[in-house]
């Protein structure tokens, strides 16, 4: 398995996947293409029972989607699900027979957050992991399933706080809110996740699939709900107000590595040309 944006290592029945899409792990068409190919390959390979995702970049796990290439990455997602929607790609991962674990260091915002939410378990570095669901800062609904995942995990009030504030949340608060399973010190995170993944992989894979299917029957939203959120995002990302806000953010350094280290502050300072005239 050779990919442009992923580095993979098979250890027993665990496939370790390192995300490496410089300069800041944006979710663009290349990364989506590789994730689709990875899932297809792993699901068809009887040797693989567990996926562990981590990042080669200590500052960014997956930053968010590349807003300049929305149509392109949605088309890549269609190669797995038949529909141009990363929401349905992420839901496919949740429903897969494979057990998926996210080992998180650095920032996971927007679709990055939605990707780790699609994984079955999430463990984050206490010192460096940052979470945000910032699409409403642009007047958009999260289009990759965050509304469905977060509301079920956190409850309505906290999910609305997270999405409507567009703030950054550290690993300790994310753990308290239910965004992740655990926040762990960086020095023990990798060993803990690897040990857990290997332990799970030693148990019968058919048991994993049955347990996931029954848990999903309770907690995983329908394909229709994911499709609706995806469609709303696709319809509204071209709205003039959203385009003005994205343009204003770009002028402040949105989608550049250094500026996004403090993205919540950038979004709070953002003003559109219309607002500047008032």
Image: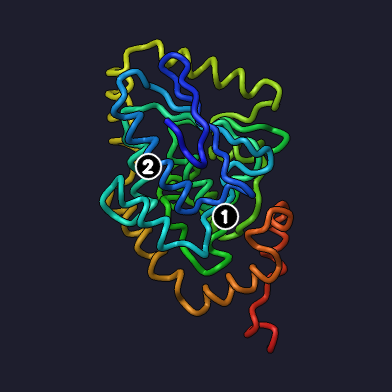
Q: What element carries label 1?
A: helix
Q: Earlier in the sequence, mark 2 or mark 1?
A: 2
Check disc 2 and report the residue beneath it: 36
- Residue 157 % position (x, y): 52, 52
Left/right of residue 79 with respect to residue 100 in the rendered view = left
Q: Give the residue drawn at x 69%, y 89%.
A: 277
Find residue 161 and name its label. 1
Q: Is mark 2 on a helix, strand or loop?
A: helix
Left/right of residue 271 with respect to residue 11 in the rendered view = right
- Residue 44 % position (x, y): 28, 28
Q: Nearer the viewer, mark 2 or mark 1?
A: 2
Sort mark 1 into few (<14), some (14-19) or many (20+) by Cα contacts within 10 Å: few
Q: Nearer the viewer, residue 182 or 33?
A: 33
Left/right of residue 6 with respect to residue 277 in the rendered view = left
Q: Give the residue drawn at x 61%, y 59%.
A: 165
The quadrant the C terminus occupies is bottom right
**Furthest residue to the bottom?**
277
- Residue 36 % position (x, y): 37, 42
């Amino acid at each position: 398995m050779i990919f442009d944006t992923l580095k993979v290592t098979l250890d027993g029945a665990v496939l370790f996947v390192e995300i490496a899409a410089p300069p800041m792990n944006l979710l663009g068409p290349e990364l989506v293409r590789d994730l689709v190919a990875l899932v297809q390959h792993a699901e068809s390979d009887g040797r693989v029972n567990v996926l562990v995702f981590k990042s080669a970049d200590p500052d960014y796990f997956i930053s968010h989607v590349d807003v300049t290439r929305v149509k392109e990455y949605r088309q890549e997602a269609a190669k797995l699900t038949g529909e141009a929607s990363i929401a349905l790609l992420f839901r496919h991962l949740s429903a897969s027979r494979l057990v998926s674990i996210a080992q998180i260091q650095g920032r996971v915002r927007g679709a990055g957050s939605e990707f780790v939410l699609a994984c079955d378990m999430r463990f984050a570095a206490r010192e460096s992991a940052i979470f945000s669901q910032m699409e409403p800062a642009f007047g958009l609904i999260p289009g990759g399933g965050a509304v469905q995942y977060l509301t079920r995990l956190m409850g309505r009030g906290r999910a609305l706080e997270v999405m409507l504030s567009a703030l950054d949340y550290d690993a300790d608060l994310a753990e308290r809110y239910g965004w992740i399973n655990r926040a762990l010190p960086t020095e023990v995170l990798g060993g803990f996740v690897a040990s857990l993944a290997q332990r799970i992989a030693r148990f019968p894979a058919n048991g994993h699939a049955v347990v996931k299917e029954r848990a999903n029957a309770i907690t995983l939203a329908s394909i229709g709900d994911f499709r609706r959120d995806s469609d709303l995002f696709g319809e509204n990302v071209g709205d003039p107000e959203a385009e003005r806000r994205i343009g204003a953010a770009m002028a402040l350094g949105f989608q550049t590595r250094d500026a996004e280290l403090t993205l919540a502050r950038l979004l709070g300072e953002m003003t559109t040309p219309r607002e500047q005239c008032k």
